Amino acid sequence: MASVPLGIRKGRRAVSAQEKRVWFRTGFGPLLQSKAMSTPEANMRQIGRRMLSTKAEQFTESVIREMTRLALKHGAVNLSQGFPDFAAPNEVKEAARQAIADDINQYAITWGAKPLRDAIVEKFARTQGVTVDPERELTICCGSTEAMMASMMAIINPGDEIVVFEPFYENYGPDAILSGATPRFVKLAPPDWTFDERELAAAFGPHTKAIILNTPNNPTGKVFTRAELEFIRDLCVRWNCYCITDEIYEHILYDGTEHITMARIDGMRDRTIVINGMSKTYSVTGWRVGWAIAPEDVTQSIRKVHDFLTVGAAAPLQQAGALALKLPSSYYESLATTYAKKRARLLSILEGSGFTVYKPRGAYYIMTDISRFHWDEAKYPAESRDVSFAKYLVEKIGVACVPGSSFYNDPQDGASQVRFTFCKKEETLAAAEARFAHLHV
Ligand code: GLN
């Protein structure tokens, strides 16, 4: 089958995700156990459950972010969540301090401070050759996470479908559920994470509202080529739909790979929503400054959603962003060079420790396959091996990773994979290497 509509997986997933992730959810316990239903306390919980949103009940908390909490709890080396553990650029930090000192401490214009919008537009034109109107086609949000959610809520109607490449960044699942879109998944196949053109074409149809693209890609490190983007463009034009493209890793590229924004592909300027942010490029994931670039009518809708979700991103950090986006091209070159060294280092650590690695062409994650380890079938059932392995690794070895199932609609599809990040200091990577010396599965 080309793809799995959410409607089919919904009931199955609610239970299987709960069973599968019970390790991650010790605070909740198995609410569906019939034995417990007869107690007054359990009945109250049942009533309580009915009071909650059925949308929110369809997904779990983020496993990526939970892995960070577990890493802290167990004193593990955290190679799970993608945030740098090294310093942000001094001049960017200084600009934030200065903005606060200058009393840029009240709300910015809800859709973004003018100096940051101008800087984004100038940089997009300089690096990608795409001209955008800062007054009508850009919305600054609280991180690219909000930009993505606001964009989906701005365009989705009941019955709309979205096409999502799989494995996918965990957030897109809840984004789809909360906005009401039905996802149709299309597989990216290792080792190069290519897609089958017929499978992709079959996922589009009259109900398709958008395709979600993420290039450079998390978790695979795939960087979509111009030919692939043009193939996707043809489908978007044929079915009259949008492309929402998450380009947050645009400057983290290896092996001479080029990032091409979908907005630059002929015929896509007016049907592309570009999601981006400061987090990864300037190593400030905690600042929560992101944005959505979209055609005027879409932007009007995004701005309304954004205004009532969050009013606006932190004003002094937007001010500092205006400076960050004007950094010279040498800054981006050195960012990519630094990450290339870290990529090489973690690839060699993981290979040396028994993982099969898929070399990323961009972003800062390595997807691995764990099938080559020796597995005790009783302890590690194949269908949830990624979760038991991640648990073993964080608790017993002292390294945190993300279970592969977090990136798939059907958890079994990711059961032989785990993801590591290398946006970490050399000493952090070295500490992981030392701990892997004890890895015997
Ligand atoms: N993008 C990061 C990751 O995949 C996490 C982002 C987040 O937690 N908001 O690890």
Image: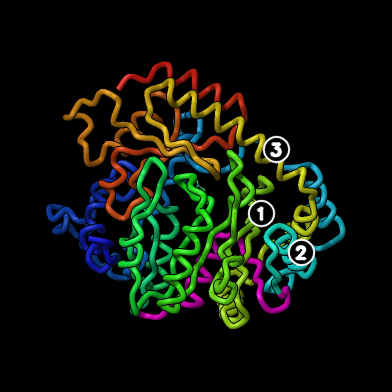
The spot of residue 289 in percent (x, y) is 65, 59
Q: Secondary structure at mark 3?
A: loop
Mark 3 or mark 2: name the one nearer the start of the chain. Answer: 3
Residue 45's place in the image compared with 406, above or below, is: below
Of residues 307 and 112, the one nearer the viewer is 112
Q: Are marks 3 and 2 in contact (CB under 8 Å)?
A: no
Q: CA distance from mark 3 to mark 2?
A: 26 Å
Q: Which three-letter amino acid code belongs to the residue tagged 2?
A: Glu
Q: Secondary structure at mark 1?
A: loop
> How many neighbours does mark 2 have within 10 angstroms: few (below 14), some (14-19), or many (20 or more)?
some
Q: CA distance from mark 2 to mark 1?
A: 15 Å
Of residues 305 and 31, the one nearer the viewer is 305
The spot of residue 247 in percent (x, y) is 57, 57
User: Which residue reaches farthest front?
Assistant: 227
- The part of the chain drawn in magenta is 133-158
- In this figure, which residue is indicated by the disc labeled 3? 87
- Image quarter of the C terminus: top left
Of residues 116 and 221, the one nearer the viewer is 221
- In this figure, which residue is indicated by the disc labeled 1? 278
Q: Which three-letter amino acid code belongs to the residue tagged 3?
A: Ala
Q: Is mark 2 within 8 Å of ligand 1?
A: no
Mark 3 or mark 1: name the one nearer the start of the chain. Answer: 3
Q: Quadrant of residue 114?
A: bottom right
Instruction: In the rendered structure, find residue 122 and report the number of the disc placed on it.
Output: 2
x 20%, y 60%: residue: 40
Q: CA distance from mark 3 to mark 1?
A: 14 Å
Mark 2 or mark 1: name the one nearer the start of the chain. Answer: 2
